[in-house]
Image (cartoon, helix red, strand yellow):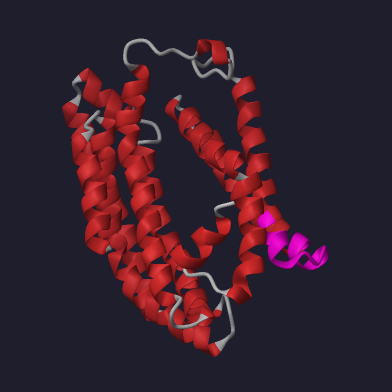
């Protein structure tokens, strides 16, 4: 119902891409919203119990399955863009079922339960969940707003410019995701190094963990920046052969890859605040960073 007014005037969609957008959004968001959200939810819950490998396997399994299903649905079944959307939806659904199966497997050894009767509203638990998770919500919301503004601006040029920007953003996300994953391994995934040490008063070990991850994530992000800046053209060309799209893509990539180190640092600082129960500081960092960008 809101798809057309959102995609056209807000996001800058064009008539020639409308049918593709409608099909993709229907399958990935309309049908696949719950599996997509629950994948992230289950992965963090399982990781919080110390099962980092099963959580990482579930996330990787969904991604690899998506890569495998894409050519099958796009070319094999000749579903084109709808095939890509269905492949994404099915990958998330199957990964979610894996997490559900794993939770059932460890049900006798974990406090995590799928039983709604165990839901508690005592001891301000819902309020704590909302306030600690609010910065993450703001980060996602501001990221959506900033990308919406960018798409709306770029849409005034051409579809090839949008395609080039999309490729550049996805390639840049790879370098960022590696550093982000290292940060999550220390903080969100699963709080033992930060949250548990902070709660127990073992500040020395907590600081040592922060220093180590800070150094390694910064090195990884910096290496990603150098590689993507000097090899922007061949990297983009690996995704598409259209010369105009490659030209736009490499320009975008050379610019946005410069932010990899600072983005990794920002994410680490924010998640550390969240891990020790700070609510205002990460919220301010998320809002300020995105507001300045816009």
- At horizontal 42% and vertical 76% (from top left) the residue drawn is 154
In depth, the one of 18 and 274 nearer the eye is: 18
Residue 76 on the magenta span = yes
**Coordinates of residue 12 in the picture (x, y in percent):** 47, 70
Q: Which residue lies furthest to the bottom in this view?
A: 243
Quarter of the rendering containing residue 69: bottom right
Q: Can residue 16 be seen in this view?
A: yes
In depth, the one of 204 and 164 nearer the eye is: 164
Q: Is residue 212 visible?
A: no
Quarter of the rendering containing residue 221: bottom left
- At horizontal 23% and vertical 36% (from top left) the residue drawn is 273
**Coordinates of residue 259 in the picture (x, y in percent):** 29, 65
**Coordinates of residue 278 in the picture (x, y in percent):** 21, 32
Magenta range is 72-85
Q: Quadrant of the C terminus?
A: bottom left
Residue 28 horizontal side relative to residue 134, left or right: right
In depth, the one of 78 and 183 nearer the eye is: 78
- At horizontal 52% and vertical 60% (from top left) the residue drawn is 5
């Amino acid at each position: 119902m809101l798809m057309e007014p959102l995609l056209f005037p807000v996001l800058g969609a064009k008539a020639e891409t409308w049918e593709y957008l409608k099909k993709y959004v229907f399958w990935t968001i309309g049908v696949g919203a719950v599996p997509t959200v629950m994948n992230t939810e289950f992965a963090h819950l399982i990781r919080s119990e110390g099962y980092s490998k099963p959580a990482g396997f579930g996330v990787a399994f969904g991604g690899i399955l998506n890569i495998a299903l894409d050519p099958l649905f796009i070319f094999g079944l000749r579903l084109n863009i709808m095939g890509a959307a269905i492949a994404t939806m099915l990958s998330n659904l199957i990964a979610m079922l894996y997490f559900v199966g794993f939770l059932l497997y460890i049900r006798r050894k974990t406090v995590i339960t799928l039983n709604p009767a165990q839901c508690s509203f005592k001891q301000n638990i819902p309020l704590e969940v909302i306030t600690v998770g609010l910065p993450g919500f703001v980060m996602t919301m501001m990221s959506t707003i900033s990308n919406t503004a960018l798409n709306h601006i770029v849409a005034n040029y051409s579809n090839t410019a949008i395609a080039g920007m999309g490729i550049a953003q996805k390639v840049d996300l790879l370098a960022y995701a590696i550093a982000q994953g290292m940060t999550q391994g220390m903080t969100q995934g699963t709080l033992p190094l930060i949250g548990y040490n902070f709660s127990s008063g073992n500040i020395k070990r907590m600081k040592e963990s922060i220093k180590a991850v800070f150094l390694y994530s910064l090195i990884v992000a910096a290496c990603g920046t150098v590689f993507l800046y000097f090899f922007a053209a061949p990297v983009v060309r690996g995704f598409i052969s259209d010369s105009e799209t490659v030209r736009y893509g490499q320009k975008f990539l050379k610019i946005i890859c410069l932010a990899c180190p600072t983005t990794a640092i920002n994410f680490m600082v924010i998640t550390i605040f969240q891990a020790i129960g700070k609510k205002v500081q990460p919220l301010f960092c998320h809002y300020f960073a995105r507001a300045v960008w816009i």
